[in-house]
Each structure stands twice: as C-alpha cells, then as structure tokens.
C-alpha cells in the first residue's frame, strides 16, 4: 500500500531567512516525528514535477533542509529516515522570490496510521502554508495561468499589478500604466527572467509580453531588498513558462466583439451623438496563442515555444469630425530553452520579439485620410546560469540584450502642423513630433549566495553586482519643420496689449534635435538574511549604485556618486507558534537619470517659440474665430495656415541648437533622486476548526517620503537678481548657458560654471546661486497609507482575496511624469521650470486616492464549471485649476498655461473640485467541455467586464484658461469615462 500525505495541518517551525530572487524560489523544511522531535540525518529528495532531475539533501541536527534557488513550480518531496516510513508529498509549491517553508511529519511503521477509503495508508500531520517570516515585502505573487483560470482579468501585466493593494490606474495620457504606492507611472521597474525590460528613455512601461508567456509575476509594492533597485515606485518581477519531461501544448482564441460592447457616454471632445453616431469610441480585439513544450534531450534539455497572433482595433471621434482608428496586428513570438548539465547546474536561454507597428488612421470630415505609424518594441535575448556548488554556496550569472524602437512617422510628415483653438490637430502629422530612434540595453549581473549556520544565528548572505549599458539614438522634429497653434486673446488682450482683446493670434514653434547618447548604471549590493533566534529574523541590506549619463558629444554631463541605499527589516514571531508575524522595514531607493535627460538637455536641441499677430488665415479668411472656423469647414486641410502680421510680439529660445558645455548644465552639488520608505505590519494565519481556518489577514502602515528630485530649472528668470546681489552690472550679466536651463535639486543652492560664450564676464568661474534667489521650494511628495488585506486560499472549491487601502498622497511634484498636462518628459517636466509656476503647486497629487477597496475570488460550481468575480471601488482624484501666471513680476512666463492660477486667482493643486468614485465589477465563467476520448482539456470561457455598465468619469479638464485672460468654457467638463461593459469570449485546448 502507498504511503501518502493527508490534508491535516501542522504549523511551520523557524527557518533561515532567504533573500528574494528574480527568477527562482527556495524550499525549506523541518522534518519531525509524531512526537514533535526533529529527525536528523533523514534523506530528502526534491523533484520538480514534470522533470526527472532530483536534488538530495540530508537534514541537520535540527531536522532542517534547504533547497535554494530552484525553478518556481510544484515539487515532489520524498523523505526517508532510518526507522521511519518513507513519506511522499507530490504537491509542494515554490513561488517566485519567496521561501516555501513547511513542517514535514514522518511516522514509524504502524504508528498513527489510518486507512483511507482507497486502501492507502495515510499519515496524519504533514504540511501547511503559513505566514512567510522571510519577507518584508508588500505586494502580491500571482501564478498567472491559475489566476486567469479562476477570476476575470485583462490579459496584460497591468491587470496583474492592479490585483495588488496600493496600486491604481495611472492617467490615460500614458496608456495602460500603473501607479504603485503613490508614485508616478514612471517610477516602476520591470524584469522578465532577470532582465530589465523597462523603457529607460522615460521609464514609462517597457516591452510588451503576452499573458500566456508568463508563469508567475511578483508585484512588489514596497519593502523590497537590496538586490532590487532603479525604482521609487514598485518592482514587477516575472518568469516565463518552461518545458518539462512531457510534451505539453495548447492553443486558444479570444475575441472582444464590438457588437457586445456598450456605448461610451459623449464627452465634449467627442460628441458622437451630435454627429449622428451612437458612440465616439469603438474597440474590437481578437488574439490567438499557440504553444508547445517538452524535452529535446530527456533529463537535460527542455524547450517552450510560443506564438501570439493579434488584431486590435479602436476608434474615436473628435469635435472636428475626424475619425481616428488605431490598429495593431504584428505577432509576438518567443521561447525558452533550459539546459541541465546535472541537477546542480543549469543554463536558461530566453528569446522573444515584441516588434510592433501601431497604425493610426485619421479620416477627416472632408473625406481625405492619412496614416501615422508608431514603431515600438524589439528583440530581447537573455542567458542565465545557476550553479549549486555546495549546500552552502550558489552562484548565478546573467547576460542580456534588448532593443526598443522609438520611431514615429506618417503620411503627413512633410506638412506643417496646425492646431486649432479646440486643440485639434487640423494639419500635419497628428503626433506633432516625428522622430526616428532606437534604444538598446546590455545587462550584466552576477550573484553569489552563502549560507552560514550557527554564527550568532543562521545567515544567508547574498553579494551581487549588476551593470546596464544603455544607448539611445534620436532624431526629432515637428511635422513639416514647424508647429503653429492658434490662440484667442481674452478681454484684456495679450502680451501687454500687443494683441488686441478677442483677437486670434498664433504661436510658432521650431524644434530640431538629433544624436546618439549613452548611459551607464552600475550597482553593488550585499544582503544578510539573519535568523537571530527561532522567533526573530533580520534582513540587513546595503545597495550602492552609480548613474552616468553622456551628452551628444560622448562626454559625461551628469554623474552621481555611489549612493548608498540601506534596506533594513525584521520579522518577529509574536506568539512563538508561527501564526503571527510582526514586521518592520526601512529602505532607501534611488532612481536613475532618464535617457530623456540626455536627449533633451545635453544634445544639440534647437527649440524656439514666437508669438505673432496674424492678418489672415488660409490666405483669404479673416483673422477671427469665425474666420478660422470657416477655413476649417470649407478649405482643404493644407490651406489653413496663418499669415503673420509684423514681427513677433514675444520670442523665447528654449534650447539654442548646440551642445552646451557640461559644467553649465548640471549643479555641482546635484544629488540623485531618492525616496525613503518605512513600513510596519502584522500578518496572522487563522488556525481554528471554523470556517476561517487557513485564512490569512494582515495590516501595514506605509510611509514614503521623496527626499530629493532632479529637475530642470530656467535660470533666465533669476539671473538678473543674482547679478544684482553680486554687484554685476546689467551690461555684464549674461546667461548660464544658451537656453538658461540647468539640472538641479529644487530647494538646494545652484553651484554652476556658466558657459563662457553666454556669460563672458564669469568665464571659467564656478558660482553659487542661493536657494533664496532661485525662488523655488524643495520638491516634496509623501505617501501615507493603512493597508488591510485578507486571503482565503484556493482549496479546489473556492477562494477569496481582498484589500482596503486608506491613503494620502500630497506634494508639489507627481514624479517622473506630469498627469496634469500629460507630459512624459521624465526629469524635465514643467513643475520647477519657472518660479511662478511653483505657487500653489503643493496639494493632493494626481495619483492620490483616499480609499480603495478590492475584492476578487472564484467558486467551483461543479468539477467542470468555475465562476469568478473581480471588483474595485475607489475614491476620486482631486483637481486644481491651471492657467497663466498673472502677477507680471517676472517670476514666470505669462504666455504658458501651466501655473496654478485661473483668472488671476491662486487655485492650488487638488483644491478646486474632485472627480467621481470609480466602480467596476467583472465576472467570468469557465466551462471545461465534456469531450470524451480527447486528451487534455477543452474549455469555453466568457468574461463580462464592467457587468453593471458603470459610467464613472475618469478624466476631467483641469485647464481653466485657453490663453492668458481667456477662460476655458470646458473647465471641469468630463473628457473621459471608464471602459463600458463589454464581453470577451474564448475557446482553448491544452494537453
């Protein structure tokens, strides 16, 4: 008769803490007899299910064993000890980046055994999941395929992130990106099989990998250890699927038909009903996946191959009657090879291509049309070696290469861009800025793990080094070489009366930039996971990282020191029974300098803007609002160009078109951008005979403080004040550099060497401009949250998981991007450009959500039918009013709609109105179809998203002025709604 494990519960005993990892997990256990005594000298064989390689361990004097850095998945554990029955458990899970720690109870022949109905001998007392005492991390680890089988989710990485507490949907201006713990969407880092796939140009998103390609995803929202860096938001760590000793494969097809999609309510920017249409927004998506895995050489080489076909189409309509349709149909393909020299040494090779072209077709009201093409994605190649040399030493090394296309072009690239009063692009490439470029990354990483027992407790030391060599090429210009935007002056005119009240005038911008730029990012770290006693574990880590960015001439223009990031945490077993963990964490996180900074600030960028009165529009139409409307209604699109009258009424040189001297660009006392985080938490596993047996509940108090920020600042607004303070005559007072912009830490002094060509009086001299003269505040952002969580794990019948987060996010800077105006110029946003723009800038930030409630789970109605649900309720975003700077004191430009003033009144960030509560409920049904005689599983699936068709407004107009002194009649109007109810249908087969 076979000896098998029973589902009885035994609590875990202490285990040595283990550092987290990018691609693997750790299995640890303590072997006891039925009297609770440790069994030493037992042989433990650990085998990954589906693979024949086994690793054998011997329990120590305390009955413990450790299988470190093994692939994630399900394992069979067999325990054999002298005088004990052999014990086998074939369903031991190992998750990404964590430690699976269990008690295993073995019995002597004839001891504490009972026969099951199947005639098997059952050992009472085996293993149970319990509180993880090895992690200070907050977040969630998801088995992608199992989660998708049970609950309704979108088929992308963002949907997985949103399952975690303290995550929110970012502003729609940046696509489908996620804010984590109050940070902007440009502060997260993404890894696949240990390789960084983050977009390093502006840190917004990265390579796109299909849902089915993933095996597990670990979403770290905070508290992560020293091996993880380059993020002040969250870290999203993913591993892909692999092959096994058996052949497996499958195919599926999913479609989201437009006919099963409800209409979106009209907004002021897309009045579909006014134009005889049911809705201004449309969407239809379909995709198919095919995969196959298995052995190439039994026991030694495994493969996984994957192909994703897709056809995505969406459409919208604007107030000019232009229908915009976006399509994507390029496939994704990739795979993974696993080589085992023996069970202790393995090599993993990963390749995938997500090279895509997004085609945007615009059909104008006159009937003609044009295309714009966004070329994104590229190739990724990863090689990773892992060697387990002894029970106490493991070495791993990784090398990877990745590319990402950064090209935008189209049919109308030769046309000069024109934007009307309603901010519609009525001429030229609708992308405005056309560009050719590519980003490439080479990554090197090596990690050494040492396990040391009985040195004032037990230790796991991890020492590591990683480096990334990044390169960007970029050539950018406006469509047709220039960009005109129409404005209408208010009742008081514009530019001190140079533009008459109510008159139409135009802004003329020129932009040209090109070059190649390189960046180096280097880090060393050490982490000690230390079990001080059987109840207290410490995580002691230190990370040192350096960032170096080069200009277009190949010279270093900004470089940080090796900044130190302590990562210090503890876990304490509150009652000594492994049921309740108290944890605390302090960590510092640095974020690199975006390559966007190289391109925009240290290149040969030419960027000017001039404002003109105009005498006519399109050659013959009067220079009035009615004349502009008539031209747009009656003339071909390429005829509505302005005819300027006289010279410019205002001129600005934003960048002079030369590579500036590096010492005139960067403050010598510049510090890298970093954030501190403090977490205190408690987690408890309920152990009782009641309905809550096995549930886990937890609470975390989280505090984040953004300590330093790198931003650009226009010194032309304060240079006269500096010269006056130093007694420099006005005739000798020049500019710091051609554009006047410098990179500094807001709130700190500026230590700079002016360019000799623009400030000859101070040629070669390093000067200090005090923070008082700079007249900008210190950058601030704080996030405070109470996070409550619970989980009822899946037991084959049902599961339930949820969270409630009560948070506050306030400051005067959002982070890398600026949701207020959709700006993705990471490191170079408008926030601190001019002193006057910082007035009223402190308040509730765009990613502030006071309350967020999430609930998701599933229930097996029968063995073949499972239903699931996923719900979220979230409080609204708060808004201010954005307008022109009205004070006329020279602290800011009066022409740009960026200040926190409207109609001359200070209107601070987040103080004027708030949006709407966001409500959404998704449901799913999965039915395993009863096809007899067919190996594997055939499944039909239906998901209904936003099943109650809630119509929560998600975007509002925050600009209170169209131009200086001209009120925006659309202020506070809704510009976007949540996705309406729609249905996804799917059919899959896998074996």
Image (cartoon, grey):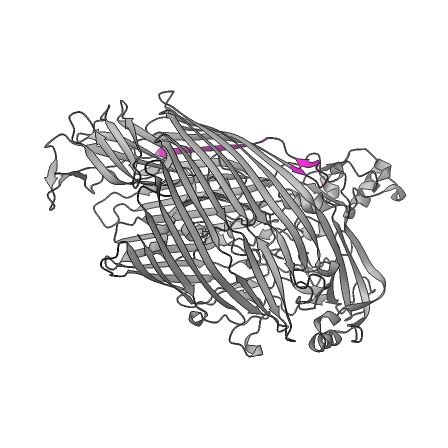
Image label count: 0
Report the front residue among 79 and 136.
79
Q: Quadrant of residue 989?
A: bottom left
Report the front residue among 170 and 106.
106
In the image: residue 221, left or right of residue 578: right
In the rendered image of this protein, does residue 988 appear above or below residue 949? above
Report the front residue among 63 and 196.
196
Magenta residues span: 549-572
In the image: residue 881, left or right of residue 685: right
Q: Is residue 566 magenta?
A: yes
Q: Residue at x 54, y 67 (%)?
A: 315
Q: Residue at x 12, y 37 (%)?
A: 113
Q: Can residue 834 be seen in this view?
A: no
Quarter of the figure that contains the N terminus: top left
In the image: residue 330, left or right of residue 118: right
Q: Is residue 648 visible?
A: yes
Q: Quadrant of residue 671?
A: top right
In the rendered image of this protein, does residue 371 appear above or below residue 628? above
Report the front residue among 415 and 590.
415
Q: Which residue lies furthest to the top in this view?
A: 455
Q: Whole-percent x and y of residue 231? A: 53, 41
Q: Whole-percent x and y of residue 281? A: 52, 69
In the image: residue 402, left or right of residue 921: right
């Amino acid at each position: 008769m076979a000896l098998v494990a029973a589902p009885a519960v035994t609590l875990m005993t202490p285990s040595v803490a283990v550092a987290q990892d990018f691609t693997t997990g750790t299995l640890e256990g303590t072997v006891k007899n039925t009297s609770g005594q440790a069994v030493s000298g037992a042989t433990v064989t650990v085998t990954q299910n589906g693979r024949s390689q086994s690793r054998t361990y011997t329990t120590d004097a305390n009955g413990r064993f450790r299988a470190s850095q093994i692939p994630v998945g399900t394992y069979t554990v067999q325990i054999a000890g002298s005088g004990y029955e052999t014990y086998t458990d074939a369903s031991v899970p190992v998750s990404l980046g964590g430690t699976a720690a269990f008690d295993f109870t073995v019995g002597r022949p004839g001891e504490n055994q009972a026969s099951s109905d199947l005639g098997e001998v059952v050992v009472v007392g085996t293993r149970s999941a319990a509180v993880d005492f090895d992690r200070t991390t907050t977040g969630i680890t998801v088995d992608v395929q199992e989660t998708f089988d049970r609950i309704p989710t979108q088929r992308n990485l963002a949907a997985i992130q949103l399952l975690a507490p303290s995550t929110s949907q970012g502003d729609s201006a940046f696509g489908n990106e996620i804010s984590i713990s109050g940070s902007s969407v440009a502060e997260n880092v993404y890894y696949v099989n240990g390789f960084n796939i983050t977009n390093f140009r502006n840190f917004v998103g990265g390579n796109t990998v299909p849902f089915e390609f993933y095996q597990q995803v670990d979403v770290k929202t905070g508290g992560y250890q020293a091996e993880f860096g380059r993020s002040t938001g969250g870290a999203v760590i993913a591993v892909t699927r692999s092959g096994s000793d058996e052949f497996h494969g499958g195919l599926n097809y999913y479609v989201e038909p437009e006919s099963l999609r409800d209409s979106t309510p009209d907004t002021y920017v897309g009045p579909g009903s006014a134009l005889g249409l049911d809705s201004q927004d449309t969407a239809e998506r379909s995709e198919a996946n095919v995969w196959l895995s298995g052995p190439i050489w039994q026991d030694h080489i495994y493969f996984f191959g994957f192909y994703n076909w897709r056809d995505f189409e969406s459409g919208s309509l604007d107030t000019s009657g232009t229908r915009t349709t976006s399509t994507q149909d390029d496939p994704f393909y990739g795979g993974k090879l696993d080589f085992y020299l023996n069970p202790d040494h393995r090599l993993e090779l990963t390749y995938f291509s997500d090279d895509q072209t997004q085609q945007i077709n615009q059909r104008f009201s006159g009937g003609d049309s044009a295309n714009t093409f966004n070329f994104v994605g590229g190739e990724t190649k990863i090689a990773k070696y892992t060697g387990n040399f002894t029970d106490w030493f493991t070495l791993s090394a990784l090398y990877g290469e990745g590319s990402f296309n950064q090209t935008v072009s189209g049919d109308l690239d030769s046309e000069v861009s024109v934007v009307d009063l309603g901010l519609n692009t009525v001429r030229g490439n609708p992308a405005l800025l056309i560009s050719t470029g590519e980003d490439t990354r080479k990554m090197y990483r090596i990690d050494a793990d040492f396990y040391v027992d009985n040195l004032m407790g037990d230790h796991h030391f991890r020492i590591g080094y990683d480096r990334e060599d990044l390169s960007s090429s970029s050539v950018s210009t406006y469509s047709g070489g220039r960009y005109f935007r129409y404005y209408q002056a208010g009742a008081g005119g514009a530019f001190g009366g140079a533009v008459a009240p109510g008159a139409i005038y135009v802004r003329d911008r020129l932009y040209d930039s090109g070059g190649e730029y390189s960046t180096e990012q280097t880090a060393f770290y050490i982490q000690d996971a230390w079990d001080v006693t059987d109840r207290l574990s410490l995580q002691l880590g230190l990370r040192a990282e350096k960032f170096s960015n080069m200009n277009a001439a190949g010279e270093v223009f900004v470089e940080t020191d090796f900044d130190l990031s302590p990562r210090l945490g503890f876990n304490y077993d509150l009652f000594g029974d492994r049921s309740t963990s108290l944890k605390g964490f302090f960590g510092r996180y640095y974020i690199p300098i975006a390559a966007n900074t190289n391109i925009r600030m240290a290149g040969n960028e030419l960027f000017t803007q001039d404002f003109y009165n105009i005498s006519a529009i399109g050659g013959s139409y009067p220079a009035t609002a009615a004349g502009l409307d008539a031209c747009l209604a009656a003339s071909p699109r390429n005829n509505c160009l302005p005819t300027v009258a006289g010279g410019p009424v205002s001129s600005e040189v934003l960048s002079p078109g030369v590579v500036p001297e590096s010492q005139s660009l960067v403050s010598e006392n510049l510090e890298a951008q970093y954030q501190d985080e403090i977490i205190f938490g408690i987690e408890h596993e309920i152990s009782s005979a009641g309905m809550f047996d096995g549930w886990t509940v937890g609470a975390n108090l989280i505090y984040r403080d953004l300590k330093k920020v790198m931003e650009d600042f226009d010194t032309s607004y304060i240079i006269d004040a500096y010269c006056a303070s130093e007694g420099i005559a006005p005739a000798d007072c020049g500019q710091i550099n051609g554009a006047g912009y410098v990179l500094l830490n807001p709130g700190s002094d500026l230590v700079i060497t002016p360019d000799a060509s623009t400030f000859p009086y101070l040629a070669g001299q390093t000067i200090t401009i005090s923070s008082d003269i700079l007249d900008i505040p210190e950058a601030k952002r704080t996030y405070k949250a109470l996070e409550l969580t619970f989980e009822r794990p899946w037991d084959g019948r049902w599961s339930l998981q949820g969270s409630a987060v009560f948070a506050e996010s306030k400051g005067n800077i959002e982070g890398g991007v600026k949701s207020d105006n959709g700006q993705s110029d990471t490191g170079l946003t408008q926030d601190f450009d001019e002193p006057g723009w910082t007035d009223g800038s402190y308040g509730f930030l765009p990613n502030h959500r006071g309350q967020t409630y999430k609930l998701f789970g599933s229930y097996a109605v029968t063995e073949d039918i499972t239903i699931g649900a996923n719900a979220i309720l979230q409080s609204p975003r708060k808004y201010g009013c954005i307008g022109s700077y009205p004070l006329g004191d020279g602290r800011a430009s009066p022409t740009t709609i960026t200040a926190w003033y409207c109609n001359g009144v200070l209107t601070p960030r987040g103080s004027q109105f708030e949006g709407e509560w966001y409500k959404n409920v998704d449901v799913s049904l999965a039915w395993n179809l009863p096809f007899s005689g067919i190996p594997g599983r055939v499944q039909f699936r239906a998901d209904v998203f936003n099943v109650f068709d809630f119509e929560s407004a998600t975007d509002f107009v925050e600009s209170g002025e169209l131009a200086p002194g001209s009120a925006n009649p659309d202020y506070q109007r809704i510009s976007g709604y949540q996705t309406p109810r729609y249905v996804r249908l799917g059919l899959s087969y896998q074996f």
